[in-house]
Each structure stands twice: as structure tokens, then as C-alpha cells.
Image: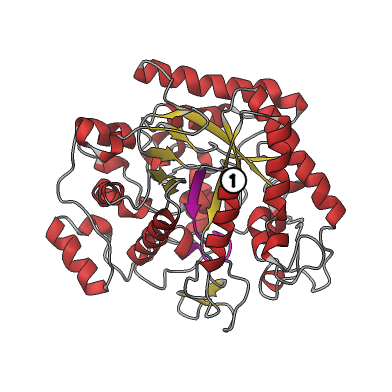
């Protein structure tokens, strides 16, 4: 979908130039979202707040870089120069928590694409090099890395696996989903993962965690979000056997992985990135705007109500209680899935090529995540909680984020798409430097459209490095069509 021809039906954030403009728009839209007109600097800034985890790891400020895939590793799972460039940008961003840096597959069959990073015995040196790169670049930029906490996100892509071809899905699923099976061309009787395969996968997670610790990483994230396999366990209400139906069974996956890591990699912290709520899948409607892909009642939205378009955090809270019982402190929040309801997961004015125009002002999506995370933080104050979904705020990101931190609605502000175009944003905010308007992510969604069409991910509109690539012209053609 071309950003040139597409005329947004909601005001662009860049048009909300003053605090009064923003206030008036939020009031008109009925969006409850606090923001501070003035930003604090130095030690008084909530962004400067430090934290020491129960395991003794230091986090030097309240900015976090969220894990993002670049679709640019080698076919055997090693990082390329493009991967290293992205990780270097994370290192010099000024953020003191790097949440896993990138989704790293624990099994070949679980890769989201044929160029996804994969940690195995042959790649240990490469992952150690990546860790040392981050450490060295951060020390060069900021003097030391004692208060930088860097982890590795471990994942299996579940029903979104494409291990051998960028165009051929080879899903691994836990149950037959009446909407998603049909959406992605799977028969109702498409084979399910067996309990034996799940046991082997759990062992693979533990082995990957041991390798991550061996190569320097201080924590691993056991990914439970965005419709990937860890997240699918939480909605496996129809699955038979010890990994389905009851919440005790649906959370067995994380319990068994955690037990294995505690036994085999003592001292390694464990984090969980979790979709704390979900909605029903959406699809493009007759006018191009997103509409529900099915009718209520919808029962597969973990953390959602049966309407499929609302939140019910009761089971999410029960899952978080399990994480507390497992002595997990690091929690990174998100919502929904980029594959079937991106407007609640990654609010944007401009949709990716396989998406739909937003059915609401994207600021609703930002406020929805902030509200849900604040409820989590209030109910579970002992988690170190990272919020997500802030990039759409653009110029107003620091003002809203400061308000969130001051009010205790989250402990850390997670940045994703924004640091692809503007990696030094955390450093600028901490130093009191005005935001660089030319670098601010405008949510054109090229970083998603490109990989959806078999290309690498990056900020093609704003990063000069990607802007001058030949594939940028190909991407423009795809979007125009």
C-alpha cells in the first residue's frame, strides 16, 4: 500500500505541534493518556532511574531496546555485517537494557525465516563476538558497560515458521485454529506438535540458554508473544494432553524450561516477553480498513474477552503469578500479533503491504497498552516491567513516557521501530537534547513490508544506509502496487 497515495483518515502526530493540540485531540478522541508538557533533565529525570535485579545485574536507566529481527543472518544462522550494524546501534543508543537484541531460534525447524539467527555449537563464536561488540561499542560511547544488561531472546516461531524459504510457511502448531488455519492455508486436520516434540523443544531451549550464558549474555527471554509458539501455548484451550486445556497445562512449557535453565545454567536470569492481551484476528475490509475476521464469541484471545475486541486480564494475571512463583523478575510487555491484528500490537498510521488501514486512531492502541501495563505493574510491583508500543507517539514519546515512569505505570520504556531510524533517541532524551525531527519514525511500516516480501528489514525511508540500497526501489514498486 503506497504511503504516497494513501491519505490517512486520522491526523498525523507531527500535526499535533503543541501540548494544547495534543490535549484537544486526545479529548476529542476520548483517549485517556497522560503526558508531561515539560521534560525533566539530569538526575531528576525518571529516565535516569537505575535498577539492580535480584540476581545482582545493574540497569543504568529506564530505556530498553526491544528485540527485532532483521531477516539478514546467514542461512546457517550466523550474524552478517547488517546484523552487527543493527546491534551496534542498539549498543550506542544510550539505553541500558537490551532486551534480547533479536529473536534467536533454538531449533532449525522453528526459524521464522531462512536467515533468522540460530544459536548452536557451530555459531558460539559468532554469538560471543556479538556480545563483545555490544559491550565494546557501549564502553566507547559511554565510558563503561557495568550498568548495561544485555540478553538474548530465544524463540520458536510456531505457526509462522519459514525455515527453508521466505515464501513457504512450514507451521508447527499446537491446535487447530478456526481462523488462523484458514487464513494461512492449513487444513483442519493439519498435524499438531506431539508432546514428545514439545519435550525435545524444551530441551533445546535449555541447551540454547546454556550456550547464551557461555557466550556472555546475562539473561535469556523465553518469548511468549505475537502468536509465536510460546504465546500459542497460552491459548491452547482445545489441545489434549499435558500441554493443553487447563491453565496449569498451558503454562507447563515455561515451567519446564525454567526448571531446566535453573539446573543447567545457574546464575542466568530469565525474562519473559509476553502479549499481555490479545484480540481476534482482523482482515482488510471492503474499504481497506481493518475489520474483525470472525464473529464473537471468540475464545482464543489470551488476555482478551469473548467479544474478541476487549481485554480480560484475569488469565494474564494467573500466568504472571506463575512467573512470580518461578522467581522471574524481568517482564517485557506487548500485545496481540503482527500477523493477525497489528493495529493493537504495533500502532501505525501507514499499514504494511499485507495489512489493513487502522480501524481506529493509532493513539488508542498506544493508550490501550499503557493502561494494561499499568494494571500489571500495580498488581505485580515486584516485576521489572518494560512497556511497549511507544514509537507511534513520535515527537511526544518522551513526554508520555516520562509521565508513565513518574506515575509508576512501568519501570522501563521499550523502543522498537523508533531506534531503526533514530538509534540515539535514549541518549538525546537523557541529555536533554531536542529530538531530531528528521530521524523520528513515522510508522511507514517499510521495516515490515520488506520482510513480508522476502527482503531484509530496515528503515528504508529515513536511514540513509538503507535508503540508498537497490532493493529500496523494489520496495517502492511493491508499495505502489
Q: Quadrant of residue 376?
A: bottom left
Q: Quadrant of residue 114?
A: top right
333 falls in the magenta region: yes
Relative side of 264 to 14, left or right: right
Relative side of 340 to 465, left or right: right
Q: Position of residue 219 (x, y in %)?
A: 57, 33
Question: Can you see residue 177?
Answer: yes
Mark 1, residue position? 455
Q: Residue at x 26, y 58 (%)?
A: 13
Magenta segment boundaries in residue numbering = 330-343
Q: Is residue 476 above or below residue 71?
A: below
Toward the viewer: 9 or 122? 122
Question: Can you see residue 347?
Answer: no
Mark 1 Cα shell of 10 Å, populated few (<14), some (14-19), many (≥20): some
Q: Residue at x 61, y 28 (%)?
A: 267
Q: Position of residue 234 (x, y in %)?
A: 65, 61
Amino acid at each position: 500500500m503506497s504511503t504516497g497515495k494513501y491519505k490517512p483518515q486520522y491526523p498525523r502526530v507531527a500535526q499535533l505541534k503543541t501540548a494544547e493540540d495534543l490535549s484537544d485531540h486526545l479529548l476529542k478522541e476520548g483517549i485517556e493518556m497522560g503526558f508531561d508538557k515539560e521534560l525533566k533533565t539530569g538526575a531528576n529525570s525518571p529516565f535516569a532511574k537505575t535498577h539492580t535485579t535480584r540476581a545482582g545485574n545493574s540497569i543504568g536507566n529506564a530505556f530498553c531496546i526491544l528485540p527485532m529481527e532483521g531477516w539478514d543472518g546467514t542461512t546457517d544462522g550466523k550474524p552478517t555485517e547488517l546484523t552487527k550494524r543493527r546491534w551496534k546501534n542498539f549498543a550506542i543508543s544510550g539505553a541500558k537494557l537490551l532486551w534480547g537484541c533479536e529473536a534467536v531460534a533454538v531449533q532449525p525447524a522453528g526459524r521464522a525465516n531462512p536467515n533468522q539467527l540460530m544459536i548452536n555449537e557451530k555459531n558460539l563464536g559468532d554469538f560471543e563476538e556479538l556480545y563483545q561488540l555490544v559491550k565494546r561499542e557501549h564502553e566507547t560511547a559511554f565510558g563503561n558497560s557495568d550498568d548495561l544488561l544485555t540478553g538474548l531472546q530465544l524463540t520458536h516461531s510456531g505457526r509462522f515458521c519459514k525455515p527453508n524459504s521466505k515464501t513457504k510457511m512450514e507451521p508447527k502448531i499446537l491446535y487447530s485454529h478456526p481462523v488462523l488455519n484458514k487464513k494461512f492455508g492449513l487444513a483442519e486436520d493439519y498435524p499438531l506438535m506431539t508432546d514428545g516434540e514439545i519435550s525435545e523443544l524444551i530441551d533445546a531451549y535449555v541447551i540454547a540458554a546454556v550456550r547464551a550464558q557461555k557466550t556472555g549474555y546475562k539473561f535469556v527471554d523465553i518469548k511468549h508473544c505475537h502468536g509465536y509458539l510460546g504465546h500459542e501455548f497460552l491459548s491452547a484451550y482445545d489441545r489434549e494432553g499435558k500441554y493443553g486445556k487447563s491453565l496449569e497445562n498451558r503454562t507447563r512449557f515455561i515451567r519446564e524450561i525454567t526448571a531446566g535453565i535453573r539446573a543447567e545454567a545457574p546464575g542466568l536470569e530469565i525474562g519473559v516477553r509476553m502479549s499481555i492481551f490479545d484480540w481476534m484476528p482482523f482482515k482488510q475490509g471492503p474499504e481497506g480498513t481493518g475489520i474483525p475476521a470472525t464473529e464473537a464469541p471468540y475464545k482464543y484471545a489470551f488476555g482478551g474477552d469473548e467479544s474478541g475486541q476487549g481485554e480480560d486480564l484475569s488469565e494474564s494475571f494467573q500466568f504472571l503469578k506463575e512467573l512470580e512463583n518461578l522467581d522471574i523478575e524481568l517482564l517485557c510487555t506487548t500485545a496481540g500479533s503482527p500477523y493477525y491484528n497489528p493495529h493493537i500490537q504495533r500502532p501505525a498510521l501507514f499499514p504494511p503491504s499485507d495489512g489493513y488501514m487502522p480501524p481506529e486512531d493509532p493513539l488508542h492502541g498506544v493508550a490501550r497498552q499503557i493502561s494494561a501495563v499499568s494494571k500489571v505493574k500495580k498488581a505485580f510491583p515486584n516485576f521489572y516491567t518494560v512497556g511497549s508500543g511507544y514509537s507511534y507517539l513520535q515527537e511526544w514519546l518522551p513526554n508520555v513516557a516520562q509521565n508513565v515512569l513518574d506515575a509508576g505505570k512501568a519501570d522501563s520504556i521499550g523502543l522498537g521501530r523508533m531506534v531503526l531510524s533514530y538509534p540515539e533517541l535514549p541518549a538525546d532524551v537523557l541529555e536533554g537534547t531536542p529530538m531530531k525531527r528528521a530521524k523520528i519514525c513515522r510508522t511507514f511500516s517499510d521495516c515490515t513490508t520488506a520482510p513480508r516480501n522476502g527482503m531484509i528489514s530496515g528503515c528504508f525511508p529515513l536511514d540513509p544506509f538503507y535508503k540508498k540500497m537497490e532493493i529500496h526501489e523494489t520496495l517502492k514498486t511493491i508499495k505502489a502496487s
